[in-house]
Image: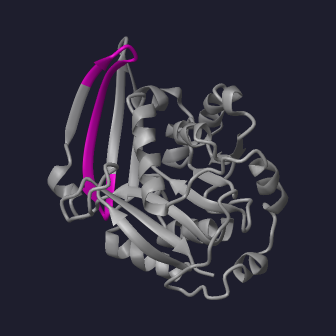
Amino acid sequence: MSWYKHWFADELYMELYAHRGAEEARQAVDLFEQVTGLRAAQDASADQDASADQDASADQDASADQSATADRPPAIGTNAPLLDLACGTGRHAFELARRGYRVAAADLSPTLLAAAARRTQRDASRLFLVRADMRRLPFHNTFAAVLQLFTAFGYFRDDAANEAVLAAVRDALRPGGWHMLDFLNAEGLPRTLTPRSEQDTPQGRIIQDRRIRDGRVEKRIRVQRDGTEREFTESVRLYTHTDLVAMYHRTGFSVVDTRGNYDGAPFTPDAPRCILFARRRA
C-alpha cells in the first residue's frame, strides 16, 4: 500500500497535526486573496449565478476576453467555485466557505473526508465533499481557483505522475483560473531539516526521524504505547522552484508570483516555504 493511503487512513494523522489549525488556515486564505485579488461574491444571486454557469465551456470562458494571452490570462467570474485539493479534514475549505465562497473539497482518504463531513453542517450550503485521486479529478472547466496546501504534492514516485496532478488541475480550472501550491522550499530544506524529534502525547511517545534520500524528504513516524509500536512513513519528492516553474509551463500554466511564507514574504533561497501562484493559460 502507498504510504499516503496507509498514513492518511489512520486517525493518528489528525492527532499528530492537530496544531495545524484555523489560524494557519486564515493566514493561507488571506495570502490567496492578497495575491489573486479574488473575493467571494456578496450579492444574493451569487449561488444561482455560479450554479448556472458551472458547466460553461472553455470556449465561452475564453471569449469573454478576446485580448487574453499567455502572459495575460482571460478574466474569470468572481462567482465561480473554488477547489480545496487534498483537503484533509477541511480546515482551509471551511475558512473559504466562511468567507462566502462556494467550495468543493476533494481528498482520497475516506478517513479524512469523514472527519470533514462531521464538521460541514454549518457551511453545508456552500461546501461539498468529494473523494478523488488528485491525478484524475472529476471536473472540467469548473473552478476559479484550486488551492493545494500543506505540501500536498510530490507524493508519487514517478515524476510523470506528479506532473499529471498539475495537468488535472489545469483541466479542472476555467481559463485564467488560479492554482495556489504551498510546497516545501527544497533548496533550503537541507539546512533546516531536524533529523529527529520526540514528544510524549496522550497517544503515546511519538518519535519522528527525518532524512533526505534520492531526491525525496522522508519521515519515519513511530508511536510507542503500552509496550507496542506502530510505524508510518511520509515521503515527498523535493522539487525546486525551477523544477516547479518548468512543470507548470509544460502543463499550460503561467507562474505569476511566488512567496516564501503565509505572511507574504518574498521567496528566497532561505524561505521556509515555496508558495507558487500560477494561472491557467487560455
Q: Residue at x 32, y 26 (%)?
A: 206
Residue for point 67% across, 61% down: 143
Q: Is residue 116 above or below residue 210?
A: above
Q: Is residue 159 above or below residue 90?
A: below
- Render colour scheme: one colour
**Residue farthest to the front?**
43
- Answer left or right for 240 relative to 148: left
Q: Position of residue 276 (x, y in %)?
A: 41, 64
Q: Nearer the viewer, residue 267 or 214?
A: 267
Farthest residue in the top direction? 226
Residue 220 in view, yes or no: yes
Q: Is residue 105 above or below residue 60?
A: above
Span of residues in magenta: 199-217
Can residue 21 be seen in this snapshot? no
What residue is rendered at 40% in x and 75% in y?
Answer: 245
Where is residue 35 drawn, in percent x and y? 43, 61
Q: Does residue 202 show up magenta in the picture?
A: yes
Residue 228 left/right relative to 214: right
The reply, left or right, for residue 180 in relation to residue 135 is left
Q: Name the foreground residue: 118 vs 131.
A: 118
Would residue 174 be counted in the magenta stretch? no
Q: Residue furthest left?
A: 191
Which is more toward the observer, 18 or 49? 49
Q: Where's residue 221, x and y in %? A: 35, 35
Q: Residue at x 57, y 53 (%)?
A: 39
Please state the total of marks drawn on the protein image. 0
For this orientation, the residue located farthest to the right is 52
Q: Position of residue 101 (x, y in %)?
A: 64, 47
> Toward the viewer: 65 or 147?
65
Is the stretch drawn in magenta largely helix, strand or loop? strand
- 214 up-or-down from 220: above or below: below
Which image quarter holds the C terminus?
bottom right
